[in-house]
């Protein structure tokens, strides 16, 4: 065994795996996994997004799914590699319905034979329903003489005139931010008739309408949209109006049926017809759309949390949630109190300070700070950077490598990164604490991304505001809350009174199923349950353990209702799997869902 190359070892494991699966020998398949194994499946085996943890779970899934899935044709892709006793290999495979791409990490079991520690299987395309790309692309021109021929533009206009009026979309996406746009682009390529409704006028407006200094926090290598990567001179951190224009151009290039200035008002599931009736308001008129599938793409950070504070109605100044903050220009020389200490609070405080406002941040509980430079160097550069691209890791590969790490053990990979960050930025952290700022690195020290997955909040990617907090330019009141709002001030829980002309509630966002409560019904929202979070039993992410993000990109407990979103990386990557699930249903393929998650929390 020891003389075999990593590729030989990987090939042998794949051959044994295929043999066990094709003969439905579940015992043999089970013996190919270490006891503490993880098999993460993105739609290919389960028609779900699901991680099997441990041999028993793997066996259970295989026993149910293999007869239908009929996996075959496992082939090593490229060369495998080995580091620290782990063989790392990519492979292609097929099922009865689809072609897939997988990744496996092997380690020697007790008997010396290789066993899988982590396995990732992903669906790439449905057989017979492939995207019309490459050699399958449309010709575009019709050479020859064709009386009455129509042009591309005429056909496009006809489609726009018919869809939603004389023809119903199969899928309706509510929310035309980056998430809705990316999913619609994939569905377009798959030939699934789709409309996106967006209450803003133009694609990209959710970025355009934010304060003028905003740039993306994530670097360009993390942000590409499907099919059309940014040009290689695109700035590392995209200014918000630039990304907005890109989204708008992308929507046109991808021929997305995008209804701007259209607000979804009500959605009702008609069980007898197996379709939704969605009332939308467009141009002052109500239209009822009747899609089979309804996707909510309203933003992980879309449902504003505004605390009810006594006296709010007496305030004579301006008060608004951070998502409605118009920018700092109107507040020069004014006194601003910003309630909250995460991303939005920091960005808004810094912009107000830059514009000559007198700003106080009210920090209620501890916050994780990660400087953008350290995040880029320590956390992201291996997968998403110019160097990674030079090393052959483009964003497609990076997304898959990232997806190959099971959530159950992901924090173990992150903790050492944040240990390093603590040392690297010790000076800043020390000065922040001296200024009274309450710092944390997550309940288990695993830092920013785990906080994002678990609770979607609790951090600031420092692009400059922390220095202003540390040096006192942004005043800080920590460990307190706003207890009462007065006509020209706020009273804090320690009795301090702060004068205020402006009060910004940077108090975060609620679970996305609150949108369901508003647009569908509280009953459906409760049936679907809390959205996002892993069940890690850490702050704001109550157990039990779920193993995947709740309700995201996979079947929910409400038939024909889906939830999509996340940051640019997640929307890019997971729109692939959501679009394939929708396409399969559009084509009437059997999609038996394995292991649908229980609902444990309503909000
Ligand atoms: C300072 C800052 C920096 C950030 N940096 C990054 C970054 O670098 N990378 C990143 O990925 N994210 C970043 N984010 C987060 C970013 O805002 C979200 O990732 C992004 O908005 C999610 O996109 P989405 O399409 O899922 O949701 P949204 O952009 O929230 O889109 C939802 C859309 O739904 C529309 N809508 C709501 N209700 C209705 C209705 N009833 N009918 C019709 N339409 C409706 C809204 O108008 C909105 O356009 C940052 C946020 C901030 C504040």
Image (spheres, grey):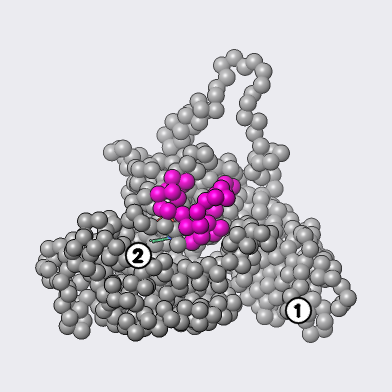
Circle 1 sits on which residue? 85
Q: Residue at x 12, y 63 (%)?
A: 316
The kind of secondary structure element at disc 1 is: loop
Q: Is residue 504 visible?
A: yes
In the image shown, does 193 or 475 lie closer to the viewer?
A: 475
Q: Which residues are magenta?
A: 218-247
Q: Earlier in the sequence, mark 1 or mark 2?
A: 1
Quarter location, residue 356? bottom left
Q: Residue at x 66, y 45 (%)?
A: 130
Residue 8: x %, y % from top left: 85, 68
**Does 129 sit above or below residue 51?**
above
Q: Is residue 86 left or right of residue 52?
A: right
Q: Is mark 2 within 8 Å of ligand 1?
A: yes
Circle 2 sits on which residue? 347
Q: Quadrant of the C terminus?
A: bottom left
In the image shown, does 215 or 17 lie closer to the viewer?
A: 215
Q: Residue at x 49, y 64 (%)?
A: 551
Task: Point out which mark residue 12 bears.
Answer: none
């Amino acid at each position: 065994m020891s003389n075999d190359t990593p590729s030989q070892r990987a090939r042998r494991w794949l051959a044994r795996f295929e043999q066990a699966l094709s003969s439905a020998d579940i015992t043999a398949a089970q013996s190919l996994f270490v006891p503490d194994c993880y098999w993460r499946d993105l739609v290919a085996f389960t028609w779900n997004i699901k991680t099997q943890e441990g041999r028993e779970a793997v066996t259970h899934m295989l026993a149910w799914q293999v007869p239908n899935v009929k996996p075959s044709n496992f082939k090593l892709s490229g060369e495998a590699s080995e580091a620290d006793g782990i063989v790392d290999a990519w492979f292609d495979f097929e099922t009865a319905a689809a072609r897939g791409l997988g990744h496996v990490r092997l380690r020697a079991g007790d008997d010396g034979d290789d066993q899988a520690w982590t396995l990732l299987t992903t669906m790439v395309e449905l057989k017979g329903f492939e995207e019309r790309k490459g050699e399958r692309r449309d010709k575009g021109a019709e050479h020859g003489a064709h009386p009455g021929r129509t042009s591309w533009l005429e056909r496009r206009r006809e489609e726009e005139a018919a869809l939603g009026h004389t023809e119903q979309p199969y899928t309706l996406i509510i929310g035309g931010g980056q998430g809705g746009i990316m999913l619609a682009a994939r569905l377009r390529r798959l030939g699934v008739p789709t409309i996106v409704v967006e209450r803003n006028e133009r694609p990209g407006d959710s970025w355009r309408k934010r304060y003028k200094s905003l740039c993306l926090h994530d670097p360009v290598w993390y942000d590409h949209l499907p099919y059309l990567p940014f040009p290689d001179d695109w700035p590392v951190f995209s200014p918000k109006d630039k990304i907005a224009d890109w989204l708008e151009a992308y929507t046109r290039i991808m021929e997305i049926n995008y209804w701007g200035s259209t607000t979804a008002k009500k959605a009702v599931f008609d069980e007898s017809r197996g379709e939704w009736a969605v009332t939308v308001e467009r141009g002052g008129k109500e239209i009822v759309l009747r899609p089979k599938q309804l996707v909510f793409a309203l933003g992980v950070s879309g449902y504003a949390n505004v605390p009810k504070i006594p006296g709010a109605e007496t305030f004579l100044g301006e008060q608004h949630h951070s998502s409605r903050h118009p920018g700092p220009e109107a507040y020069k020389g004014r006194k601003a109190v910003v309630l909250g200490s995460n991303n939005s609070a920091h960005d808004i405080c810094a912009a107000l300070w830059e514009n000559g406002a007198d700003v106080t941040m009210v920090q209620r509980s501890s916050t994780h700070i990660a400087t953008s430079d350290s995040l880029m160097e320590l956390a992201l550069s291996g997968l998403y950077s110019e160097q990674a691209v030079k090393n052959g890791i483009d964003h497609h590969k990076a997304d898959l490598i990232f997806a190959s790490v099971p959530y159950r053990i992901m924090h173990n990979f992150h903790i050492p990164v944040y240990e390093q960050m603590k040392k690297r930025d010790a000076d800043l952290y020390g000065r922040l604490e001296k200024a009274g700022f309450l710092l944390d690195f997550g309940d288990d020290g695993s830092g920013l991304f785990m906080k994002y997955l678990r609770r979607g909040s609790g951090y600031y990617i420092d692009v400059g505001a922390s220095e202003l907090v540390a040096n006192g330019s942004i005043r800080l009141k920590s460990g307190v809350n706003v207890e009462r709002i007065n006509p020209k001030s706020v009273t804090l829980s320690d009795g301090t009174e702060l004068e205020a002309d402006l009060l910004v509630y940077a108090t975060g966002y609620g679970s996305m199923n609150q949108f369901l409560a508003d647009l569908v019904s509280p009953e459906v929202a409760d049936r679907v349950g809390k959205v996002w979070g892993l069940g890690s039993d850490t702050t704001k992410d109550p157990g039990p353990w779920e193993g995947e993000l709740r309700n995201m990109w996979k079947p929910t407990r409400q038939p024909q209702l889906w939830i999509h979103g996340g940051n640019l990386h997640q929307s890019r990557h997971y729109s692939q799997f959501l679009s394939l699930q929708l396409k399969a249903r559009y084509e009437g393929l059997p999609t038996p869902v394995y292991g649908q998650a229980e609902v444990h929390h309503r909000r």
